Image (tube, rainbow, N blue to C red):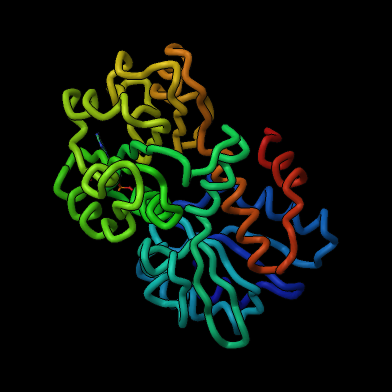
Amino acid sequence: LQSGALQKLEPPARLSVFGDPVAHSKSPGFHNAALKACGIAAQYVKIHVTPDQAAEAFRALPAAGFLGTNVTIPHKAIALATVDEADEYARQSGAVNTVVVDGGKLLGFNTDGPGLVRALREEFFVDLRDLRVLLLGAGGGAGRAIAVQCAREGCERLVLANRTVEKARELATELSPYFRSDRLIGPAERIQAISLDESALRSQIEQVDLVINATSVGMKRSDPPVIPAHLLTANLLVYDTVYAAGRSRLLEDAQAAGARTANGMSMLLHQGALSFEIWFNRPAPIEAMRAALLSP
Ligand code: ATR
């Protein structure tokens, strides 16, 4: 954000994404396609905001004629701290990815978890609440948001696997009230924390339906696999939240094992569609957004 960049933007109404870096963001492309498809006279721009500018940039939104903004790395926590009110899921996940300007007030939401729910329905025809989930990477912001969503949906089982197992344990303890013994398996079985060690993964992977990767491991060819390929089996659903071009090592290994796979493009699309629905209180033109997202 160069000095006063927000103020320089003229009407019509603006939306934006704040990030650092932000140049690679695909949000302007598919949000502008949505605005056009709905005949809404607004423009969606990306704004480079550094951490020391973030709080001020959020507070500048109402006066600068913004309807709201999306928030990406690394500003989701400061967005939560800066908004006047945030919904319960955003507070629990410690992150806001969607800000609404409501009069002079800033309201915060997080559409990442609900976006994943829609993505899984679309990709695999499944509901998170019916599934036993192995979440790889429960230590970062993305992993936390997904774990909280799994808990709130009441998924059958949640295994939090993290390199630093202590972080997974803390999150499991925090989320344990969501996992009661009103099912065939007891609460201690329904939520567990493990390390990413092969032996720990091997003992759990036969008892899950869906593997979600929330680490960034595996995107570079030089990365080791986030989990050993031979642990992956044909009955698994494997979702990688990363959406960089091409397939991650995890998805390649999973496909080779015969598993059904999908990458984070659908989560990106649906979190954006949900932001649109929050801003405009109407269904998002999902196919227009998808076409824009998939166009080179
Ligand atoms: P974000 O907040 O964007 O999700 P992050 O804070 O970098 O990103 O966290 C990424 C997650 O990937 C964490 O769970 C991290 O594990 P730790 O909690 O042990 O740090 C995990 N991660 C990052 N690099 C990893 C690696 N080489 N092997 C295994 N897990 C890794």
Q: Residue 276 location, x and y as percent?
A: 66, 61
> Total marks drawn?
0
Q: Tell which of 215 and 238 is nearer to you.
A: 238
Q: Position of residue 170 (x, y in %)?
A: 19, 55
Residue 235 found in image quarter: top left
Q: Quadrant of the C terminus?
A: top right
User: In the rendered image, which quarter is residue 8 located in?
Assistant: bottom right
Q: Residue at x 71, y 68 (%)?
A: 280
Residue sitting at 37 percent across and 61 percent down? 93
Q: Is residue 213 left or right of residue 124?
A: left
Front in this rendered view, residue 79 or 160? 160
- Residue 227's spot in the image, x, y percent? 29, 25
Please name the residue shown 21% across and 32% down the image: 196
Vertical placement of 243 versus 282: above or below?
above
Where does residue 212 sit, x and y in percent of width and height?
Answer: 40, 36
Horizontal side, residue 203 vs residue 15: left or right: left
Q: Quadrant of ligand 1?
A: top left
Extreme-right residue of the structure: 39
Q: Is residue 36 above or below residue 78?
A: above
Q: Residue at x 39, y 17 (%)?
A: 233
Relative placement, left or right, of 5 versus 172 is right
Residue 120 or residue 130, whichever sits in front? 130
The foreground one among 232 and 293 is: 232
